[in-house]
Amino acid sequence: MTDADYEPFFASDLAAEVRREYAGRIDHGVPVSDATRDVLAIFRDLLADPQEGPVIFLALAALQLRDGRVMAFIRDAALDLIGTGEAKRTYASSDATMNRQRRELLKSLEQGLESTDVIDEADRTDDAAM
């Protein structure tokens, strides 16, 4: 998938901010595990919110999958959100075309996450070599 394929995940202000925070760290050489931990700390007050929390986890999953460095707990959280339908509810729209695109994107994200290798949070050497 390309950056353009992932763009619907970042349509909301929150998802765009997650991307900015994460990318800013990764671009400066921060390991994936540390960048992820930092982003979760920044948005910790929103993680339990049923509308906002899924956006954070799905955005991180899409970013990590795009970069080929998916952490196990991010993959598991995203797959759970997709499997339970919470992801679909989070991205619901009154626009039928947008709903179809997001449904397809969630399916693609699910397939990508299911088939990717994950990194262990303690995998600091491979993580830093990115």
Image (cartoon, rainbow, N blue to C red):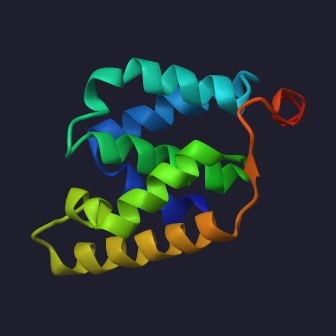
Furthest residue to the left? Answer: 94
Residue lying at 17% horizontally and 80% vertically, measured from the top left:
96
Q: Nearer the viewer, residue 40 or 99?
A: 40
Residue 19 lies, in percent from the top left, at 48, 38
Residue 97 lies, in percent from the top left, at 24, 80
Q: Is residue 24 left or right of residue 9?
A: right
Q: Is residue 128 left or right of residue 110?
A: right
Residue 59 lies, with reference to residue 28, above or below; the image says below
Q: Answer with the quarter of the image where residue 125 lies.
A: top right
Q: Answer with the quarter of the image where residue 128 lies.
A: top right
Q: Quadrant of the C terminus?
A: top right
Residue lying at 71% horizontally and 63% vertically, measured from the top left:
116
Residue lying at 63% horizontally and 55% vertically, measured from the top left:
65
Residue 111 lies, in percent from the top left, at 57, 74
Residue lying at 20% horizontally and 46% vertically, measured from the top left:
51
Q: Quadrant of the N terminus?
A: bottom right
Q: Nearer the viewer, residue 39 or 85?
A: 85
Determine if residue 49 is in view.
Answer: yes
